[in-house]
Amino acid sequence: MPAPDRPDPDRPGFDRPARPVTALDLSAVDPLPEATARYFALCQEKLGLVPNVLWAHAFDIGKLNAFTGLYNDIMLAPSGLTKLEREMIAVVVSSANRCWYCQVAHGAAVRALSGDPVLGEALVMNWRVARLAPRQRAMLDFAEKMTLASARIGEEDRAALRQAGFTDRDIWDIAAVASYYNMTNRMASAVAMEPNPDYHTQAR
């Protein structure tokens, strides 16, 4: 779909969700602060939608800003991990946690970034059947173990990442991405966060 014209603050280019995005009775601030409205309009322009996770946090702008600030640092800041690799971690962690929102949203992101719908589906359903480089397989092994048995992480797990070519800074970033999605998965599941319907048809 064509991107809308960049809106001015008096006429933001996005609509509020027609239905509640969580099971909680927490409505987004109305009107949104000007800076938040600009941010949501930019999401609409760049992504074709405002992710429901943002609407879910928008009942408290401080919480929304904290959430987006951490997301931007972990997922978009410079890193030895590519954006696709970070999204792959998000999907594998979310699949292990069976988080409906994040499997749908980040599965769509993997499809879009990789140009490979099969990869996006495999990571959601059973990442071990996906055709992956050894580096990616080591990364996802580590992220899955962090999710399912974090107390069992040992030096041998970090050594496996180093052997696959990751630096210690990269290992920190893998752990940070996996940790972030373990937190957001649990929150999304706890409040029955509903993914945007648009995600289901994107990049197929």
Image: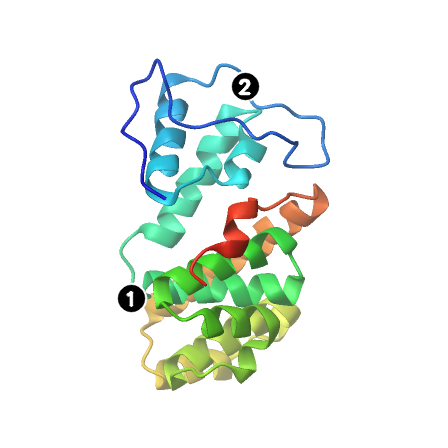
Above or below, 89 against 134 in this view is above
Q: Which mark is residue 29?
A: 2
Residue at 37% over, 18% down: 34
State how the image is colored.
Answer: rainbow
Depth order, front residue of 56/122: 122
Depth order, front residue of 23/6: 6
Residue at 53% over, 70% down: 121
Q: Amino acid at mark 2?
A: Val
Residue 150 rendering spot, x and y as whole percentages = 61, 68
- SS at mark 2 in the image: loop
Callout 2: few (<14), some (14-19), or many (20+) C-alpha neighbours within 10 Å?
few
Asked whether disc 1 touches disc 2, contact meaning CB atoms under 8 Å apart, the reply is no
Q: Which quadrant would residue 172 be assigned to in this image?
A: bottom left
Above or below, 107 against 50 in this view is below
Residue 67 rendering spot, x and y as whole percentages = 48, 39
Upstream in the sequence, badge 1 or badge 2? 2
- SS at mark 1 in the image: loop
Q: Is residue 163 visible?
A: yes
Which quarter of the rendered picture does the N terminus lie within?
Answer: top left
Above or below, 165 against 87 in this view is below
Q: Which quadrant would residue 134 be assigned to in this image?
A: bottom left
- The residue that disc 1 covers is 80
Residue 175 rendering spot, x and y as whole percentages = 47, 64
Q: Amino acid at mark 1?
A: Gly
Above or below, 50 against 150 in this view is above
Residue 178 rendering spot, x and y as whole percentages = 51, 62
Which quarter of the rendered picture does the C terminus lie within?
Answer: bottom left
Disc 1 to disc 2, C-alpha distance: 37 Å
